[in-house]
Image: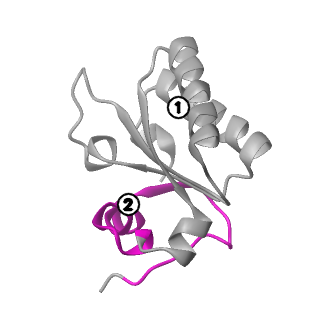
Amino acid sequence: MGLRNYLNENEEKAIKALEDALSKKFGLLDLRLFGSKTRGETHSESDIDVMIEIADSNSEIEAQINEIIFEINLQNDSFISAVIFSRKELQEGSLAESLLYKVVQKEGVPIIQTSSSVMVSSS
């Protein structure tokens, strides 16, 4: 199923721009659409929920990602809202067990996913 089943034209352009920017700058491992857009429960004020997984993260990297999202939102009249996970946190910490991460892995729509993305069991 393509993004057009979930997003309008501006939103789709915004997600593609985000994918390109994050892939070039941070080595994007996984990008998933989730939330009301994927459940078909959108309204005029709905945001575009995405999960971003990169190799490693810190507050500076997250600030850079948020700045990229801000600029893309302005350019595309969109409202992307992101949760950011690092592969390191998922593999070495307890974040892979977080309810949000598990729900996004189960119900989210993959936009990009590399073979090195962390997968967790649904149990």
Q: Amino acid at mark 1?
A: Glu
Quadrant in the rendering for residue 123: bottom left
Image-based side of 65 in relation to 1, left or right:
right
Residue 61's image quarter? top right
Residue in the image at 50% along x and 24% along y: 9
State the residue in front, 58 or 14. Answer: 58
Q: Position of residue 68 (x, y in %)?
A: 62, 27
Q: Which residues are magenta?
A: 95-121
Indicate whether residue 112 is drawn in magenta. Answer: yes
SS for callout 2: helix
Q: Which mark is residue 84?
A: none
* Precedes in sequence: disc 1 or disc 2: 1
Which residue is rendered at x = 65% and y = 31% of the image?
Answer: 17
Query: Measured from the top left, where is residue 110 in percent x and y?
Result: 51, 57
Which of the labelled discs sits on residue 104, or is there none? 2
Residue 45: horizontal and vertical position, in percent?
Answer: 25, 22
38 or 79, nearer to the observer:
79
Residue indicated by mark 1: 12
Label 2 sits on what residue type? Val
Q: Is residue 25 above or below residue 34?
A: above
Q: Is residue 100 above or below residue 102?
A: above
